[in-house]
């Protein structure tokens, strides 16, 4: 019995299509930073990016929530307004979108992204404590589980061992 060429092509298309439809991957396009139209620095500018890069989103639901001092978050708010606020509106990092992107992820993942890419004109140009303070502010602004008597520290092991536990009211 001879199978026609079109029957074989149709069968392969169905198999590939079904496999693609049922495969659920946990891969997202990389997070990017773009200037908003109302940014004090000018019009939106795309960052240089590798279009083939992908971020595998890892969840950290079974590790403890990060802790930070209220004073750390207060310092972070000031830094955010002075440095980050020149390009980003608070709505970009406070609210439902932040919660959907960062809840139950390791604090280190967020810290490393911010430290490596911000500020846009001088990535990595702030002091370690300033980056940690900004992270603490954004956690507090997004209703993090709780502030405590322990602060965020520039210790990658500790940052990887704690998660972001935020929620949208």
Image (spheres, rainbow, N blue to C red):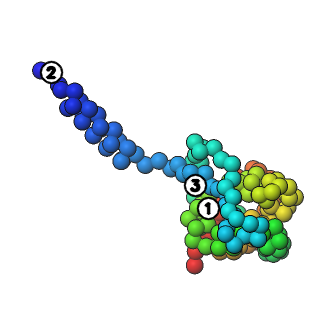
Which corner quadrant holds the N terminus?
top left
Residue at image point 65% right, 47% down:
49
**Which one is in front, 51 or 41?**
41
Q: Return the residue at label 1.
A: 102
Element under disc 3? loop
Separation (CA) of disc 2 from disc 3: 50 Å
Q: Quadrant of residue 88?
A: bottom right
Which numbered disc covers residue 59? 3
**Circle 1 Cα neighbour tier, 10 Å, few/some/many (<14 / 14–19 / ≥20):** many
Q: Are marks 1 and 3 in contact (CB under 8 Å)?
A: no
Q: Is residue 37 above or below residue 126?
A: below
Which numbered disc covers residue 12? none
**Circle 3 Cα neighbour tier, 10 Å, few/some/many (<14 / 14–19 / ≥20):** some
Q: Return the residue at label 2.
A: 2
Relative placement, left or right, of 138 versus 153 is left
Mark 1 vs mark 3, foreground winner is 1
Q: Position of residue 19 (x, y in %)?
A: 35, 42
Relative placement, left or right, of 131 versus 36 is right
Residue at image point 57% right, 54% down:
59
**Which one is in front, 104 or 115?**
115
Q: Is residue 50 above or below residue 153?
A: above
Separation (CA) of disc 1 from disc 2: 55 Å
| N-term-proximal mark, 1 vs 2 | 2
Residue 106 visible somewhere in the drawing? no
Q: Position of residue 56 (x, y in %)?
A: 57, 48
| N-term-proximal mark, 2 vs 3 | 2
Q: Position of residue 35 (x, y in %)?
A: 69, 64
């Amino acid at each position: 019995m001879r199978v026609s060429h079109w029957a074989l092509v149709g069968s392969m298309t169905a198999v590939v299509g079904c496999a693609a439809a049922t495969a659920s991957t946990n891969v997202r396009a990389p997070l990017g930073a773009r200037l908003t139209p109302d940014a004090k620095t000018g019009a939106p500018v795309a960052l240089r990016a590798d279009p083939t890069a992908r971020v595998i989103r890892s969840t950290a639901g079974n590790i403890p929530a990060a802790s930070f001092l209220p004073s750390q978050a207060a310092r972070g708010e000031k830094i955010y307004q002075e440095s980050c606020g020149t390009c980003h509106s608070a709505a970009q990092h406070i609210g439902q979108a932040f919660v959907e992107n960062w809840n139950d992820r390791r604090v280190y993942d967020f810290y490393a992204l911010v430290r490596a890419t911000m500020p846009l004109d001088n990535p990595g140009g702030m002091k370690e404590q300033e980056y940690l303070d900004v992270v603490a502010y954004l956690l507090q602004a997004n209703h993090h589980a709780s502030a405590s008597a322990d602060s965020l520290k520039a210790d990658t092991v500790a940052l990887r061992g704690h998660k972001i536990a935020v929620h949208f009211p």
